[in-house]
Image (tube, rainbow, N blue to C red):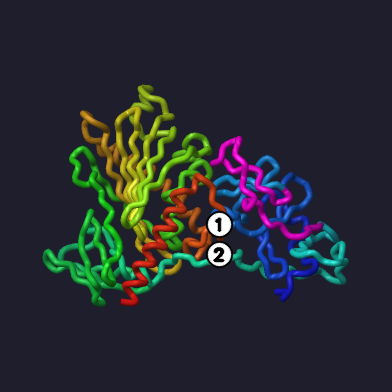
Amino acid sequence: MSSTSTGWFPVARAAEVGTTPVPVGAGGRAFVVVRLQPGGEVSAFPARCPHRLVPLATATVTEGRLQCPAHGWRFDGEGRCADIPSLGPAGTPPPRADLATPWAVEERHGWVWVAPERTATAAPPRPAAAPVPERVPEPTAPSGPVFGNLDPSLQHAWHPVALSRELRPGGWLQVRLLGRNWMLRREGPELAVEPPAYGVRERLGVIWLAPAEPAEVDLEVPEAADRRFVSRWLPPLRSPGPAGPMADTFLDATHGAFVHPSTIGPADGAEVAAYDVHREPGGFTSVQEQWCDNPVDPEVALGGRPLRQRRRTTYTFRAPFQLRLRQEFLDSGATTTIVYLLQPEDLDSSRLYVCLLLSAGPGQPLPTPATAAGQLALQHRILDEDIRSQAALDLAGLPLDRRDEVHVPADARGIALRQALCDFMAVGQRQLAA
């Protein structure tokens, strides 16, 4: 790898660069090269989208522009952000949304050449032998702090570590939490854990473990005690990444049209209307109304209601990784509440627990087993899409410095998440220092 970013660097054979981005390295920096039109000239871009730092190696070329796969931000050949779907057709991208492209990119001598910085040599030199491109470096990491799965403050929290049904009477279960192995045992009505911890308990059908005295506020789920709701747990899933970015995804209002087009589709198209966020002890609550597809409504198949329906979603978040989404379908009266709980296992592994609580609405019979099974299957497909998206993200944690990402109004819950985790870290640090 070169020790300087000045000069021309051969990055790929020209014949190998088409309309699919190719990750390359030049001067120790990560880029992607791509043709925004079939047979057109080559463009070069930084390796990550400035919005949520998604690797642009997974981007696509759409209508002559590079489109980020997570939220649909589009960039022209000069790196200017030409479209942010959540802002709507009249929205203007902020200046920081533009990509800092390299000084120059040229296609010469059968190769694509990149000059990351201004250089005195106007064109790439003719090589005496076949060039050897440098190893592709890792995309640039956030410059500020990130909230990862091994942050010391996480010692001071109740963490989900198993569904209650996973630990049988008289049995034992080994779990992974915060980079350590823990042994759970069920001895009669009591739970025990080794090595010793502050506590272990059962709540909401989940076994929770707190390594040290907890600092967080519990997430309340009123639907769990409401007889109008049927509850079903999905089998626990595992995400190959930290819990913070996954929590950010569950709170996000703008990725559905791009990450979930074949399952739930876009809500209100891609534009997102303004919504409020109310800070509360341990987290926040946010309410948002949208039009969305509701394929699990039985009346849709019978022609009694359209697929497109009004939905009010109430997001309730409690640090570090507990989230409740209450989705009220205003046309049918049905309500679906989704509880997301994340277990930070290791730096690059998080276990995910998801519970669906379903109600057909006032005066209606309970959802049938077939209805519940259909909703579980749909949610499983949605989560599989989210996990694939997280696997491509390749971040060590959730960036906490707002300067590391570009935020737009639709990201209000993401900003609130980062603030809630900063507050949680501060409380945890005070407890560690006590």
Residue drawn at (88%, 66%), measured in percent from left and top?
126
Residue drawn at (47%, 61%), measured in percent from left and top?
398
Q: CA distance from mark 1 to mark 2?
A: 8 Å
List the residue tagged with mark 1: 405
Residue drawn at (66%, 59%), measured in percent from left and top?
46
- The residue range painted magenta reads 77-106
Left or right, 358 with respect to 413, comes to left
- Under circle 1, the secondary element is loop
The single residue placed furthest to the top in the displayed view is 304
Seen from the viewer's position, the closer of residues 404 and 61 is 404
The quarter of the picture where the N terminus appears is: bottom right
The disc at residue 142 is 2
Mark 2: few, some, or many residues within 10 Å (few <14, many ≥20)?
Answer: some
Which corner quadrant of the image does residue 227 belong to?
top left
Which corner quadrant of the image does residue 350 belong to?
bottom left
State if disc 2 and disc 1 touch (CB < 8 Å): yes
Left or right, 319 with respect to 266, comes to left
- Under circle 2, the secondary element is loop
Counting from the top left corner in percent of width and height, residue 179 is at: 38, 72
Majority secondary structure of magenta residues: loop
Counting from the top left corner in percent of width and height, residue 191 is at: 18, 67
Seen from the viewer's position, the closer of residues 79 and 91 is 91
The disc at residue 42 is none
